[in-house]
Amino acid sequence: MTDRRSTITLNWRPAGQPARRVDDFAEVPYTPRNATRRQERQDHASSPIHERLQNWARWANAKERFIARSATAAFCDRLKKEAGLLESFSDERRRMDDEDAYLIELSLFHLRGTQKAILRMHYVEGRAWQPIMRVLQFPVRRELFESLLRTAQAAVELMVEKNTERQR
């Protein structure tokens, strides 16, 4: 069944087959890895729900939105503002759509915990995708993060549409 060899050589080959040459490797043309996925990410970042979620993040992080803890704190904040010691965020407030941000905030209550968490960590807290995946205890893979983010964005968009239909 097998050929018994008396000596071991580097060029040994089964009977009838030619010796393999070192330069017999075929060249394969270069194709960029994940070229289509990179394009999907760019299209995904310019979607309308992405812009609405960025507006929601600005609204959630706005300092003027938070209510003072006590009457004394509110009075002190008002005095600081009148004295010019407190920064004015009026231009930031003009760029925000408060009603749309509030609609998104209300819609988050109807989402699953993972979807809420990924949207809050990504948009409001501004975390990178790797720590988000570690906190959520998922494998740290970019494709999985993109998939989870798209799913969460689609879910919040659907809930916002339902909430606007209810209000009409």
Image: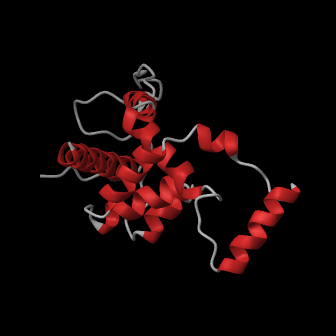
- Classify residue 32 by image quadrant: top left
* Left or right placement of residue 103 versus residue 82 in this view: left
User: Residue at position x 27%, y 61% from top?
Assistant: 111
Name the outermost residue toward the left.
Answer: 1
Q: Give whichever of 77, 54 is nearer the camera.
A: 77
| Image location (x, y in percent) of residue 51 | 46, 37
Q: How many numbered marks does the figure carry?
A: 0
Look at 72% across and 79% down and name the residue there. 72
Q: Indicate the quadrant containing the C terminus: top left, top right, bottom left or bottom right.
A: top left
Image vertical order of residue 20 relative to residue 56, above or below? above
Relative to residue 65, is residue 74 drawn left or right? right
Up-down relation of residue 9 to residue 86 (above or below): above
Residue appearing at x 79%, y 58% in the figure:
81
| Residue 127 appears in view | no
Residue name at image x 23 percent, y 36 percent = 15
- The percent coordinates of residue 138 (x first, y second) are 37, 66
Task: Give the percent coordinates (x, y) of residue 68.
Answer: 64, 72
- 42 or 90: which is nearer to us? 90
Could you say where residue 83 lies in the image, as x and y percent from the top left? Answer: 88, 58
Q: Is residue 152 visible?
A: yes
Q: Is residue 114 above or below residue 156?
A: below
